[in-house]
Amino acid sequence: MVRCFSLILVAVFIKVQLCLQSSCAGKQEPASQEGAAGCGCDKLRRAAAGSEDPEERASSEAAVKYTAAGNEATSEMVFIPGGEFLMGTDNPGIPQDGEGPQRPVHVDSFYMDVLEVTNQQFQSFIEATGYVTEAEKFGNSFVFEGILSEAVKSQITQAVAAAPWWLPVKGANWKHPEGQDSNITDRLDHPVVHVSWADAVAFCSWANKRLPTEAEWEYACRGGLRDRLYPWGNKLNPKGQHYANLWQGDFPVHNSGEDGYVKTSPVKSFPANAFGLHDTVGNVWEWTSDWWTVHHTTDKQHNPTGPPSGQDKVKKGGSYMCHKSYCYRYRCAARSQNTPDSSASNLGFRCVSQKKQ
């Protein structure tokens, strides 16, 4: 079922259709709850605001307005040595997501941000360029109900069909993550959220970087390990320790916060993988440059970049909302998608480059 509703944007009175689909249902791995619903975060879609190609728009805007050589506000980068790895899996946790088949892929060497882009870094970008994010232009963004104040929730009468924990919040954006009564003053070292794919591209271009391909992202996430679920191995909590910011408890009604956090955590709160990358899974979803498809060749590929076009962009890594019973997507092989103009309280990014910046 698809439920569409309209939000009237203050001052400009532009009607924006937010097409809300059913939750991201998918069969989990055998140990998971059979038939459990998904987190719904891949269905937070806006109706097309125009016919302009999002890649052309993002690259054009970035090239004209936002390139800043020698920018010092961006993250430390680590060298990722090129090589061959097995991408995807033949034992998918969510088959409908196109996690398989497992296939040999070679990627050339590149550099990757050690950390997800933070609020402080994104703020520097905004101050230097005057960029306005898509969430700000639309006047709203999706926020998980469990982190909203009662005052904000009391003003909302609509929710995502079959995933009512996702609410469209007026005034929610990167600097007001839970709406106008929130700010980022005490979380400048947290990953930025409510950034669309085009917003992420604009930041990367300003920093003389780019978004990773899905293959680059997954190769980096695996940290050189072969056939492992997570960046650190196959056990979620080795020796009882938490290695990522995920959901503990009963999703979506209770997050016990056993890992120390019930929403985003400061970057570097959890151990790095063997490549030195923090938060490749958990904390926030990360955009990639690839268009979404669930069909993959088994032939060996060299630096694959995904389909030439599509409707959704691939995101990787899961978020603080992921729990095995609902959204078992905090594995390196796991994947999900959103329209390029989507934004939410658990969606961010990190950049890569062919040269160290």
Image: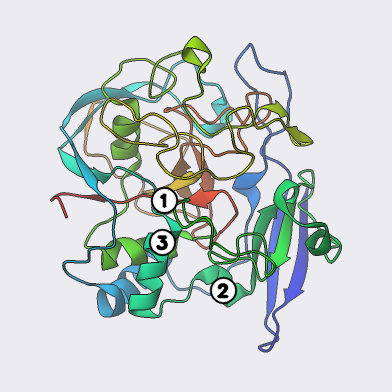
Residue 231 located left or right of residue 82: right
> Residue at label 3?
120
Residue 224 located left or right of residue 260: left
Residue 136's tag is: 2
Query: What amino acid type is highlighted by mark number 3?
Result: Gln
The local secondary structure at tag 1 comes to: loop
Separation of residues labelled 2 and 1 (CA atoms): 18 Å
> Residue at label 1?
349
| Residue 164 seen in render | yes
On screen, 209 above or below 328? below
Frontmost residue, 164 versus 350: 350
User: How crowded is the residue under tag 3: few (<14 C-alpha within 10 Å), some, or many (20+)?
Assistant: some
Query: What amino acid type is highlighted by mark number 1?
Result: Phe
On screen, 141 above or below 40? below
The quadrant where residue 27 appears: top right
x%, y% of residue 255? 71, 33
Upstream in sequence: badge 3 or badge 1: 3
Task: Give me the residue at 76% from left, 71% from top.
Answer: 6
x%, y% of residue 137? 56, 76
Query: What amino acid type is highlighted by mark number 2?
Result: Glu
